[in-house]
Image (tube, grey):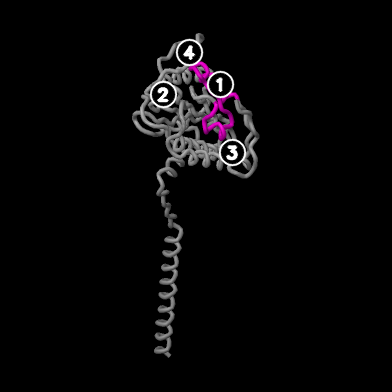
Amino acid sequence: MRTTSIAGSIALLTSLMVIAGCSATNGTAGSVTQNLTPTVTPPSDATEVAYQAPAANDSGAKDKISLRRNFYFVFDGSGSMKEPPHTQNSDDDQSPTSKIEGAKWAVHEFLKKVPGDVNLGLYVFDRYGNREVLALGANNREQFLADVDKISASGGTPLGAAIAKGTAALSRQYDRQLGYGEYRLIVITDGEATDRLSDGVTAAEAKRIPIYTIGFDIGQQHALRRHSIAYRSASSAKEVEQGLEEAAAELDVFDQSSFNGGGKRKPARQG
């Protein structure tokens, strides 16, 4: 009887130890599960990182509905812009000695009339190369004009690459504003493209980005006339300014379905 009782006690004690061990193990496992933290892999693409955390002057800090207007300028600083314009208007505030100086003057005058909440961006090709000198963003007017003043004419006319860059910038901004607002790609040039113009205009047409072109001292036959919402032939600095004002005044109706190829854009006149 006693032997049986001892054996029973040992069996009971063993069972309790097993149960206690299982409980401890289960508690530990539950604790580990509750403390797991998801692994976040940051985007490898630098552009995507910038998109998630834009610069301070970028209007798209977060994706949100915005009715802001966006003007992205392509400024021709090619070698031919050193030449004087054929026409000098007596009502110009100055008589520029070259087309480059006349175009700079026109941009300065134009921006005096542009509301302060317009997003501005600038792409330049000149003596220093082909590049975006100012990303599309808000509250950057002073920097924009300072960058325009630094343009030094020389080299070719890579309009195709410039238009493609402007198209990409405006398309990204369209996404940030959730399909709202207005978008303008404004080109000031005095010559035909020296690269593949089709690379730029094909991208702009695919994204439904409207091109507004001011042809300085080159008449009506520029190739961009066929691809622009509005084309203005300007023979003087004053007419360049007027062309810029017309580009800003044009109102095209966009909606989310039409912007990126899903519909039709309201046509506008060509000047």
Residue 179's disc is 3
Q: From which residue to which does the magenta span run?
A: 220-249
Helix, strand or loop status at disc 4: loop
Mark 2 highlights which residue? 81
- Residue 258 pos. (x, y %): 62, 41
Mark 1 highlights which residue? 245
| Looking at the image, residue 114 lies above or below residue 207 | above
Quadrant of the image occupied by residue 133: top left
- Would you say the residues marked 3 and 4 are in contact, meaning their CB atoms lie under 8 Å apart? no
Disc 3 residue type (three-letter): Gly
**Residue found at x 42% / y 89%:** 4
**Residue found at x 55% / y 24%:** 232
3 or 1: mark nearer the eye:
1
Which mark is first along the chain, 1 or 3?
Answer: 3
How far apart are the alpha carbons under marks 4 and 1?
19 Å
- In terms of depth relative to the viewer, which is nearer, 201 or 253? 201
Disc 1 residue type (three-letter): Glu
Residue 88's disc is 4
- Would you say the residues marked 2 and 4 are in contact, meaning their CB atoms lie under 8 Å apart? no
4 or 1: mark nearer the eye:
4
Helix, strand or loop status at disc 1: helix
Q: Main secondary structure of the magenta part?
A: helix
| Looking at the image, residue 206 lies above or below residue 244 | below
Disc 2 residue type (three-letter): Met
Quarter the C terminus occupies:
top right
**Residue found at x 48% / y 22%:** 217
How far apart are the alpha carbons under marks 2 and 1?
21 Å
Quarter the N terminus occupies:
bottom left
| Looking at the image, residue 131 lies above or below residue 146 | below
How far apart are the alpha carbons under marks 3 and 2?
36 Å
